[in-house]
Image (cartoon, rainbow, N blue to C red):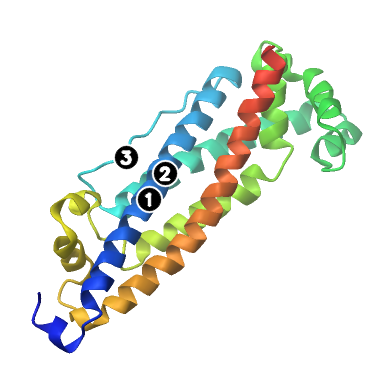
Amino acid sequence: MAQSDFLYPQNPRRRQEVNRLHQQLLDCLSDCFQVTNKLTGLLNAHLGCRLAFIEMRSDATIKRNCDLIIQAVTKIQKELQKVDEALKDKLEPTLYRKLRDIKERETEKIAIVQKVISVILGEATAAASAVAVKLVGSNVTTGIISKLASVLTHIGTSILGSIGVAVLSLGIDMVVQAILGAVERTQLQSAIQSYEKHLTEFKAASEKYHHAIAEVTDAVKRQLR
């Protein structure tokens, strides 16, 4: 037991809580890497993109891993913007407005994209049209992905950003030391609050991101049946 624990008997419990929250953060990061790679695979396979897959770095900090995801989704956004611009250029204004109309049926949107997708990609497939509709004709790019990148930026610039991903394997005290550095352990509660705040935002953004990409995957599967 640390000396400060005699003055602050809640510290052992707080160390356990910090450790638990740190693992949750790593789990969320890992999920984001997987979902981003799934989205990358969809774009490469169906929209002719050449995006690179990313891998979580156990030898890097949380900030570095956040940056890897941010860089990947930024490239994805640029590719989707190119597709959006091409659709806007090739489609009649009324059809393009229907594509962007959230009230329009998905089947109608796919039919609209199918009219010009071969001109854009060199070939026409229902799967490609479904991917374009799900990602371009929705708020995935402007809303969900942008929100995820914003949350990851906040995590990277917080006190959590400088913590190494692999520090968890070194034990609870090493996690605490990495988080607090020269800060007194009486401030463990502040560290917990920081984790909880960022985790709440991260989980919400991550769940929406995961759900959106799962919908794209399901749409592609329906077209390939």
For residue 66, the mark is 1
Locate residue 59, reporting x and y percent: 20, 44
3 and 1 marks in contact (CB < 8 Å): no
For residue 56, the mark is 3
Residue at position x 8%, y 82% from top? 3
In the image, taking residue 122 as reference, residue 9 lies left or right, namely left
Residue at position x 72%, y 41% from top? 138
For residue 69, the mark is 2
> Rounded to the nearest whole Å, what is the CA distance between mark 3 and mark 2?
9 Å
* 104 versus 182 height, above or below: above
Residue 20 visible in the shown view: yes
Locate residue 16, reporting x and y percent: 26, 65
| Mark 1 element type | helix
Mark toward the start of the polypeptide (3 vs 2): 3
Residue at position x 10%, y 77% from top? 2
**Split into 4 quadrants, where in the image is the C terminus?**
top right
Q: Which of marks 3 and 2 is in front?
A: 3
Residue type at the position of mark 2: Ile
